[in-house]
Image (cartoon, rainbow, N blue to C red):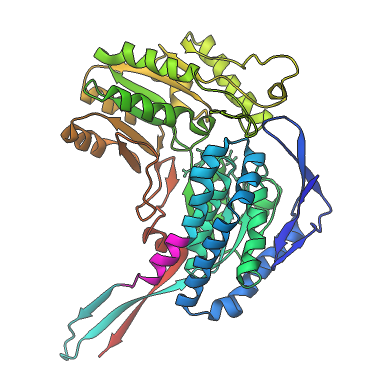
Amino acid sequence: MTTHKLFIDGEYRAAKSGKTFDKISPSTGKKIADVHEALTEDVNDAVEAAAAALEGPWGKMPKGERCDLLMKLADAIDARKAEFMEAEVQDTGHTRGFAEKVEIPRGAANFRIFAEMLKNTGGEYFHMDTHDGTGAANLELHRPKGVIGVISPWNAPFLLMTWKVGPALACGNTVVVKPSEESPATATLLGEVMNEVGIPKGVYNVIHGFGPASAGELLTQHPKVNGITFTGETRTGEAIMKQAAVGLRDVSFELGGKNPAIVFADADMDKAIEVTMRSCFANTGQVCLGTERIYVERPVFDEFVSRLKAGAEGLKQGGPDTDGATIGPLISAEHREKVLSYYKKAADLGATIVTGGGVPDFPEGDYRNGGFFVEPTIWTGLPEDSPIVQEEIFGPCCHIQPFDTEEEVIAMANDTNYGLSATILTENLGRAHRVGGKMEVGLVWVNSWFLRDLRTAFGGSKSSGIGREGGVHSLEFYTERTNLCLKL
Ligand code: NAD
């Protein structure tokens, strides 16, 4: 049985709390690991190690050398890709294709891109006239913020955790990472690689545990944590914001979504189906950017619904060890219960169930009966104020609504508390630009989905987040800026 210890000050350590919890495989429902739970003393050790590392070789290291080390780290992740992939798919039940093509390479890229960026980014300079005629020079200086608490979710664990750790370290901070209790493996493994390439001890620390009354809450309340970057549910963001209010610590939040896709009648229908199949069902619908509301212009509504239905019914259920599987399980029994409660609610509210709506029927003795599988599900016929259309379900499901005019669809797409992303499918680029500019979201894709250039600003508006990360935008959160005014 695998055991995941804490990684503190460059060493794997048993939790002083003496507590462990079980990690269950989403594909089989069986226990696959014991995980050490960090409580007060352990969290304190991790934060103290991170604070001490700021004063050690890491804090004194020139920026260029620090960035070179992070480049080496990215290469070392690539060299151990198979190990990271295995750890990730066993924890999450993801298909190997998603882990191999997206999750693990993006993990390495998250270090590479921010190391390159930091090496090549300067600050503002403003010359200023003065009464005595000599002038003054204003120089923007950047300092690391300090100890950054990184709280990450389970839906793309390595990608999302490194998306925070990459810029945090490139900017010279140290981190204490609290990965999701559902996905402890890759964050733990990364500790070995940090040591292998010579990242000084205490720079990267990992504590395991839960949120409330456990490692997550203890970390975000710790007075020596200088900033908190969090990806997860909106409700959890609200709790963390309260915890971060003590001592007025800065936060960066990437939260939930209820993202619309808008399909105009002039869209290339093959492309629209290909894009929407991915945005609804990739990673079993457990993607913050995923589509759960689809609006289709009335003349192509029936064609779209029947083609998406055929696509959903063609998906093959299976865990990472099933050849040719195209859709995996949900992460946990608890999450499956939540998704199934929405499946039931949709039926109770009178939705037309185009396909799915329950648990797949596997043969007796099939390992998948122990896993947390649900059917890919499509509904139509519900009003816009229905909870199915308003609340984030985070499963392989969507509701499809017809529309008649641009104004009507803009209003429907924006009528939600969330504001993360939107997808527009049309061959009319003028319309794409016009409608895209009216979406109350942080990210709009036209004729694509999840196409990410890591230099661009990433984040959500309304209840989907606070702040933007990515490229130079990450400097806003991961550094403190000082304006140095030099009288000439
Ligand atoms: P979650 O909010 O339940 O948990 C996320 C992390 O927060 C976990 O590590 C958890 O242990 C920790 N946590 C929970 N309560 C806490 C507390 N009170 N204090 C400190 N830490 C606490 O989210 P999840 O279920 O792991 O992930 C799914 C959610 O994440 C979805 O809502 C999804 O939309 C969102 N998400 C957003 C983005 C984005 O970029 N906007 C990306 C991925 C996922």
Q: Position of residue 73 (x, y in %)?
A: 55, 64
| The magenta stretch spans residue 427 | no
Magenta highlight range: 112-123
Q: Is residue 66 left or right of residue 31?
A: left
Q: Quadrant of the N terminus?
A: top right
Q: Is residue 418 left or right of residue 446?
A: right
Is 138 situated above or below 351? below
Residue appearing at x 33%, y 22% in the figure:
295
Q: Where does the image place residue 136, in percent across and percent down from the top left? A: 24, 85
Quadrant of the displayed image that contains ligand 1: top right
* Residue 437 image-quadrant placement: top left
Residue 29 in the image: state x and y as whole percent. 73, 30
Q: Quadrant of the C terminus?
A: bottom left
Residue 326 seen anywhere in this rendered image of the structure:
yes
Number of numbered tags placed on the structure image = 0
The answer, for residue 223, to whether it is visible in the render is no
Q: Please report the residue visible at 57 percent of the width from the left and 58 percent of the height from the top.
A: 79
Q: Is residue 430 above or below residue 346?
A: below
- Residue in the foreground of this view, choosing between 117 and 444: 117
* Viewer-nearest residue: 28 or 466: 28
Please provide percent x and percent y for residue 175: 59, 63
Residue at image point 46% right, 17% down: 378
Q: Is residue 112 found left or right of 39 in the rendered image?
A: left
Q: Residue furthest right?
A: 18
The secondary structure making up most of the magenta span is: helix
Can you tell which quarter of the image residue 318 is in? top right
